[in-house]
């Protein structure tokens, strides 16, 4: 009996001795009465001098609260703390040979008024696991766009990177589509950011719907299949994997365009938001994920400016974009260093008796004196200026310069001074909400009479949207005249002329230049004059180069003419000379 009791006790002692957790018996003030080997190995790093007389003293540097918890524990017996985690952090000196614990968990049990039992465990692995989980969660949050719950730029970069250099070597059967919304900022500006956000969420939903697996020949692969991501304000990216034919990508692009461009109804407002897409095919991808995204955005910008839905990237586009970048930098400098200047081309009155009126008006045409390239014509930089946001500064410069020159001519030429100043506007200027106020300011600063200012807009621009329309009406309310430039080249027609708040229609050079040789063009000019007259608008024929053309447009009763026949665009002093010397020039008969 005795033997078996002994054997049982011995077994229990062995069990406690070898337990993979630390067991320590202490007094109420921490003095260690018993401890198993696991305890000493867990505690040893905390007691480099080997002094393990008192548990609280050993743990004081890392868990001073234990002592207090014990004193505060009033019950006769019970759990003082359970799995209290202690971060040993850097408090331990290295060199123990084996991996030292980073985290300990301690439970304290009050056995009776004088005895405590401490249970110690190494929870380093568990803590590490928890830490990893948190890191993973944070990481995935760092890859998700909070608004749309789509992957974000970082996730897309990784995905593209995987496809460029994925397992099994780089492959090229993928495509990256860069989507951007045309004039999205207007939604935020007019309806508020909350409405803008709703539109973005709705767009994201439509993109997801389009990308649902279907028979496009684009297969979902383990490499990620189709990913739609939001990488910035109104910029989205779609990555298609497993693309067999370029045509498949274009059909996805077409479906994206169709679906996303349908109207959205937000807070009772119907919102139409067109999208432009730039596509980089895997076979054309160069560099890293960022350069692929950049190339896709270059193609997207071309889609946008060309009013095409999508454009597939080609390498020549990158060179063009670089050239544009150069122009942008140079243009910024030009504005600073006053390298822009304005020429004036006379607009003459075409009188019934065949004579011309040289004081009718002028059109201001901007030029750039480039230190290396010489004089650069506007067609080479206006578009860049629009794209990079410099158009506001360029436009302000031209308007201010032209108005002050115009006012100065009166002092020199008196009654012979031009009566009307035409200044070209571009799309981006009109889209700017502060534009009208800016014009009013310039008029005031230069003492320019608004009735003598005529702003030229192109057909496509004037027909564009309600916001542009209301901006045009604001300008008219200032007393300024409006002129439709390049008429005949845009998409509005004679039938919709009455919808535009313009005073003058300028017939495009392409009609005028054929007026003396093509009956068809003559008929078009004639019809334009008739419709314009019926609406109370007058007409200008631009690009008159020959006497024959001048005669034809005069016969067709066009009111005014402009072109090399009369004069090329001139600098201000030369214009003064031209007017002074040719005040009543007869038409070449
Ligand atoms: P536009 O407004 O249609 O201007 C007429 C263009 O035709 C001018 O070219 C003018 O020099 C040219 N031209 C005039 N008469 C003749 C002619 O008899 N034959 C030929 N072949 N050409 C003639 P320019 O100055 O190079 O301007 C080109 C375009 O650049 C302008 O077309 C206008 O759309 C834009 N532009 C010019 N200045 C400005 C500006 O200050 N702001 C903005 N936004 N655009 C401007
Ligand atoms: Mg013009
Ligand atoms: Mg024109």
Image (cartoon, grey):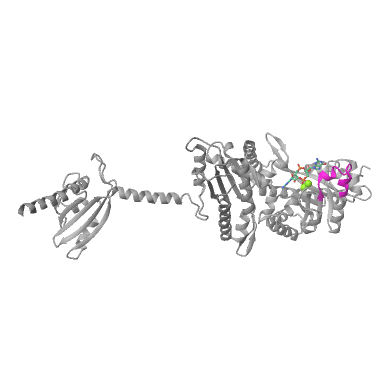
Q: For the view shown, which residue lies furthest in the top direction? A: 372
Residue 138 shown in magenta:
no
Return the residue nearer the eye: 252 or 484: 252
- Left or right: 452 as drawn, with respect to 313: right
> Does any portion of residue 583 appear in the rendered image?
no
Q: Quadrant of residue 320?
A: top right
Image x and y of residue 478, in percent: 74, 59
Q: Is residue 269 above or below residue 131?
A: below
Image x and y of residue 51, in percent: 16, 47
Q: Quadrant of the C terminus?
A: top right
Return the residue nearer the eye: 562 or 582: 562
- Left or right: 32 as drawn, with respect to 330: left
Image x and y of residue 153, in percent: 52, 47
Span colored in magenta: 506-523
Q: For the view shown, which residue lies furthest in the left direction? A: 2
Image x and y of residue 98, in percent: 24, 40
Counting labels gives 0
- Left or right: 165 as drawn, with respect to 360: left
Q: Residue at x 41, y 51 (%)?
A: 137
Residue 515 shown in magenta:
yes
Q: Is residue 529 above or below residue 73?
A: above
Q: Residue at x 41, y 49 (%)?
A: 136
> Does any portion of residue 514 appear in the rendered image?
yes
């Amino acid at each position: 009996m005795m033997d078996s009791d002994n054997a049982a006790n011995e077994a229990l002692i062995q069990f406690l001795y070898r337990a993979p957790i630390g067991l320590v018996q202490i007094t109420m003030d921490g003095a260690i009465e018993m401890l198993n080997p696991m305890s000493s190995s867990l505690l040893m790093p905390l007691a480099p001098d080997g002094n393990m007389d008192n548990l609280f003293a050993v743990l004081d540097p890392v868990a001073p609260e234990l002592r207090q918890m014990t004193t505060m524990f009033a019950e006769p017996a019970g759990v003082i703390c359970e799995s209290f985690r202690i971060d040993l952090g850097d408090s331990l000196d290295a060199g123990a040979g084996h991996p030292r614990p980073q985290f300990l968990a301690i439970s304290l049990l009050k056995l009776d008024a004088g005895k405590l039992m401490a249970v110690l465990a190494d929870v380093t692995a568990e803590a590490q696991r928890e830490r990893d989980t948190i890191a993973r969660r944070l990481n995935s949050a760092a890859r998700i766009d909070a608004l749309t719950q789509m992957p974000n730029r970082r996730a897309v970069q990784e995905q593209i990177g995987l496809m460029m250099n994925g397992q099994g070597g780089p492959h090229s059967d993928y495509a990256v589509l860069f989507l951007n919304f045309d004039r999205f900022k207007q939604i935020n500006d007019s309806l508020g950011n909350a409405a803008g956000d709703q539109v973005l969420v709705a767009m994201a939903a439509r993109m997801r719907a389009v990308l649902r697996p279907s028979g496009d020949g684009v297969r979902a692969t383990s490499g990620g299949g189709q990913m739609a991501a939001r990488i910035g304000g109104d910029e989205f990216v779609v990555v298609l994997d497993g693309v067999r034919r370029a045509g498949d990508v274009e059909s996805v692009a077409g479906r994206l365009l169709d679906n996303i461009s349908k109207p959205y109804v937000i807070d009772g407002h119907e919102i139409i938001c067109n999208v432009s897409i730039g596509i980089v095919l895997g076979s054309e991808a160069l560099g890293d994920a960022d350069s692929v995204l950049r190339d896709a955005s270059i193609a997207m910008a071309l889609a946008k400016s060309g009013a095409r839905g999508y454009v597939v990237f080609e390498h020549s586009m990158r060179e063009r974009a670089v050239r544009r970048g150069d122009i942008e930098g140079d243009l910024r400098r030009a504005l600073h260093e006053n390298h822009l200047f304005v020429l004036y081309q006379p607009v003459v009155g075409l009188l019934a008796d065949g004579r011309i009126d040289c004081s009718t008006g002028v059109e201001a045409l901007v030029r750039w004196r480039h230190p290396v390239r010489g004089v650069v014509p506007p067609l080479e930089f206006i578009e860049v200026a629009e794209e990079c946001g410099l158009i506001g500064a360029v436009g302000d410069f031209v308007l201010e310069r032209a108005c002050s020159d115009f006012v100065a001519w009166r002092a020199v030429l008196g009654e012979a001074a031009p009566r009307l100043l035409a200044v070209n506007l571009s799309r981006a200027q009109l889209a700017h909400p502060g534009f009208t106020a800016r014009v009013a300011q310039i008029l005031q600063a230069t003492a320019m009479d608004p009735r003598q200012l005529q702003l030229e807009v192109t057909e496509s621009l004037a027909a564009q949207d309600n916001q542009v329309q209301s901006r045009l009406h604001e300008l008219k309310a200032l007393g300024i005249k409006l002129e439709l430039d390049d008429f005949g080249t845009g998409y509005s027609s004679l039938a919709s002329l009455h919808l535009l708040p313009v005073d003058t229609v300028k017939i495009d050079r392409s009609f005028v230049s054929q007026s003396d040789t093509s009956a068809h063009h003559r008929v078009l000019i004639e019809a334009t004059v008739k419709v314009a007259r019926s609406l109370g608008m007058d007409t200008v024929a631009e690009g008159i180069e020959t006497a024959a053309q001048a005669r034809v447009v005069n016969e067709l009763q066009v009111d005014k003419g402009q072109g090399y026949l009369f004069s090329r665009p001139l600098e201000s002093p030369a214009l003064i000379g031209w007017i002074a010397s040719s005040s009543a020039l007869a038409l070449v008969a």
